[in-house]
């Protein structure tokens, strides 16, 4: 961002690096990434549209590797958004680094994850990886129209629990997936995709809006002027519910609490997925128990959405860069605390 010296940016990186390394002598490697980008965009078309927009993105990400004997574990924590250096008025680089380092150290000390079918609570802190990957991509109109989505030809049908409403909202202030106009000059929108369990529509760019005989939802996005716009998510989320998150935990006698999701794989055609859990805990008698490592969640997107039986009144955001057709664009995702009554947890121990 203009007016911010290189020295200030370097100071943030050094501060985060020192904080992560100071957590524990078992920290062996720290990688701190700072990046900022300022884009000036202009979109014009043959219909007489002319739109200009400035976008500034700032990102800080810390990855920590910790080791003890033959065991190696990692921790990762990113922050950022559609903003400049003012990001650090609200976010302390030291806390970001310490969160990543403690996650790595905790994984060293954690017990092996259990395996089998069990209840899982996804904390609002976990980020919306599952909603983005297992649900969001399937609601993009290009995949849906081409029959490459489990949600193809299902508008008006119940595809989730009545407790679940799914939104894509590019109008949120300073979120990483936000913008004023998409890359086809369409104003950003808040789009309801699933409302109280009923599929209402898909995310569209101009091309697929014409194919669906509808209007663009403002989701035509591209990595740069060198790429053509395609249907992309912005900030995708499950809307908050009415329940106290602590009550959801208290009313779950046993299972797994997920505090942070990792990467994974999704088959958009049938909705099957597998995701890593990078920070998780056993649930014992409605309370947070021992930390676990090596857990995965395996299931089917629509089936999981249909089975959700508790939704909290909180909302936690995460950030990422979404890849599709060789293009990467900044995105956000969010979710409230929610309970899945039964899902396959992959681990190495027997409960």
Image: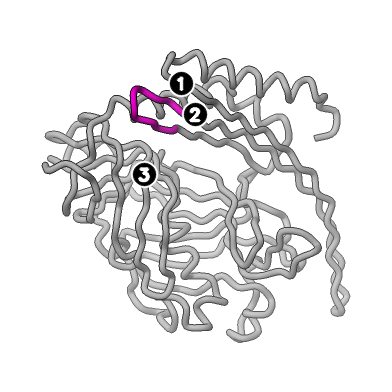
Give the magenta part as a residue range.
64-74
Q: Quadrant of residue 105?
A: top left
Residue in view at x 56 percent, y 70 percent = 203
Q: Is residue 94 left or right of residue 338?
A: right
Q: Secondary structure at mark 3?
A: loop
Distance Cα–Cα, label 2 vs label 3: 32 Å
Q: Is residue 296 left or right of residue 227?
A: left
Residue in view at x 59 percent, y 27 percent = 91
- The label on residue 64 is 2
- The label on residue 192 is none
Q: Is residue 97 left or right of residue 187?
A: left
What x and y, as percent, mark residue 57?
71, 42
Q: Is residue 68 magenta?
A: yes
Contact? badges 2 and 1 (CB < 8 Å): yes
Q: Secondary structure at mark 2?
A: strand
Front residue of this view, candidates 229 and 195: 229
Q: Main secondary structure of the magenta part?
A: strand
Q: Residues within 10 Å of mark 1 (few under 14, many from 20)?
A: many
- The label on residue 27 is 1
Residue 96 visible? The answer is: yes
- The label on residue 313 is 3
Q: Secondary structure at mark 1?
A: strand
Distance Cα–Cα, label 1 vs label 3: 36 Å
């Amino acid at each position: 961002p203009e007016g911010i010296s290189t020295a200030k940016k370097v100071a943030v990186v050094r501060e985060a690096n020192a904080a992560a390394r100071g957590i524990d002598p078992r920290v062996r490697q720290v990688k701190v990434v700072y990046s900022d980008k300022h884009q000036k965009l202009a979109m014009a078309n043959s219909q007489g549209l002319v739109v200009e927009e400035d976008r500034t993105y700032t990102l800080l990400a810390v990855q920590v590797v910790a080791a003890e004997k033959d065991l190696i574990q990692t921790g990762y924590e990113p922050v950022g958004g559609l903003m400049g250096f003012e990001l650090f008025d609200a976010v302390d680089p030291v806390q970001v680094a310490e969160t990543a380092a403690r996650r790595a150290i905790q994984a060293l000390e954690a017990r092996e994850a259990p395996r089998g079918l069990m209840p899982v609570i996804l904390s609002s802190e976990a980020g919306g990886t599952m909603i983005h990957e297992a649900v969001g991509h399937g609601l993009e109109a290009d995949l849906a129209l081409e029959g490459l989505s489990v949600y193809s030809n299902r508008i008006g049908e119940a595809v989730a629990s009545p407790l679940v409403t799914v939104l894509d909202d590019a109008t949120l202030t300073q979120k990483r997936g936000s913008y004023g106009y998409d890359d086809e000059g369409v104003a950003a929108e808040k789009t309801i995709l699933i409302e109280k369990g009923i599929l209402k529509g898909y995310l569209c760019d101009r091309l697929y809006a014409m194919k669906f005989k509808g209007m663009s939802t403002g989701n035509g996005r591209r990595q740069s002027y060198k790429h053509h716009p395609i249907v992309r998510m912005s900030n995708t989320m499950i809307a908050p519910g009415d329940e106290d998150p602590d009550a959801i935990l208290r009313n779950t006698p046993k299972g797994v609490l997920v505090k942070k999701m990792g990467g994974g794989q999704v088959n958009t055609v049938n909705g099957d997925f597998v995701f890593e859990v990078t920070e998780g805990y056993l649930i014992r008698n409605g309370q947070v128990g021992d930390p676990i490592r090596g857990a995965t969640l395996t299931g089917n997107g629509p089936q999981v959405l249909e089975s959700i039986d508790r939704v909290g009144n909180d909302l936690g955001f995460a950030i990422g860069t979404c890849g599709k057709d060789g293009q990467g664009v900044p995105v956000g995702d969010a979710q409230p605390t929610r309970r899945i009554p039964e899902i396959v947890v992959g681990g190495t121990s027997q409960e």
